[in-house]
Image (cartoon, helix red, strand yellow):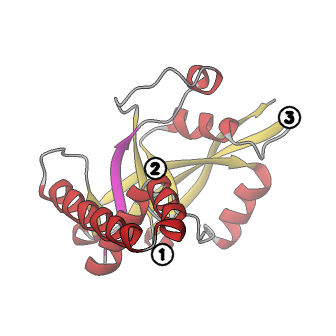
Amino acid sequence: MLFTSYHGTDTASCQQILTYNFRASAKIGWLGTGSYLFQDDFELAKYYPSTKNSLDGEQDIQVLKCEINIPAEKVYDVTDPSGANNKVFNIVRQQLIDKELSKSRKNAKSSEVNVQKINKNLDGIVFNAICRREDYHLVRAHTYTFQDIERKHPIFFTHIPNGTELCLRDNTYIVNKTIVGGESIG
C-alpha cells in the first residue's frame, strides 16, 4: 500500500527528520506509539504544530511530504466503523478495562491512579497491544484534530473526524521525504 502523508513541525526538527528520519518516541498517542502523519492532508499537517505548547513565540513551520510503502498485511486500519479491525479493537479494549477494574478492586489506592493513567491513553495502549501481538506497523484511523475554537472554548466538542491520521511504528517504510511548504506562526 502506498500512502501519501504530511507531517508539520518546526524547521530544526524538520532538518533532523530529513537527516536521521523520524525519532521513535515512548509517548503513547491516540493511535499508539509511533510517528504521526496526516494522510493526504497538507493543511492539517501545517496547522497542527501551531497547537503545541512547545512552540513559544514566532516559529517557522515546515511540512514534510512522506511517501510510505507498506504491505497491506502490516496496516491496522480502523477507518471502517463496522470492520473486523474495529471489532477486535473493542474486544481488546474491553479486556484491558476488565483487567484494570479487577486490579482496582483488589488494591483501591494504587490502582485508582493506574486506571486514571490508562484511561487517558486507553486507545493508544490498545493499539500498541494489538500491533505488538499481530505485528502491525501502521495504524490508520479517522481522527479529529482540535481547531482554535475548541482550544479557546473547550466546551465545544465533536466526534466527527476532520482527517485521517497514520501512526507509523516502523519508519523504514518511508520511501521518500521532501519539504513541501511552511510558514511563520506566532
Which amino acid lies under the numbered mark 2 shown in the image of this protein?
Answer: Ser
Taking the spot 28% from the left edge, 61% from the top edge, the residue there is 93
Measured in 3D between alpha carbons, the distance from the residue under mark 1 to the one under mark 3, in whole angstroms, is 33 Å
Seen in the picture, residue 140 relative to 100 is either above or below; the reply is: above
Q: Quadrant of the N terminus?
A: bottom left
* Residue pointed to by mark 2: 5
Q: Which residues are the magenta region?
A: 136-143
The residue type indicated by label 1 comes to Thr
Q: Is residue 43 left or right of residue 30?
A: right
Q: Nearer the viewer, mark 1 or mark 3?
A: 3
Along the polypeptide, which appears first: circle 2 or circle 3? 2
**Percent coordinates x, y for residue 56 in the rendering:** 84, 40
Q: Which mark is residue 58?
A: 3
Q: Earlier in the sequence, mark 2 or mark 1?
A: 2
Dot 2 crowding, Cα within 10 Å, few <14, some 14–19, many 20+: many
Name the amino acid, label 3: Glu
Q: Residue 165 location, x and y as percent? A: 42, 48
- Residue at 13% in and 51% down: 83
* Residue of label 1: 172
> Residue at the spot x=49%, y=53% of the render?
120
Rendering quarter of residue 129: bottom left
Which sits in the foreground, 164 or 26? 26
Q: Nearer the viewer, residue 63 or 145?
A: 145
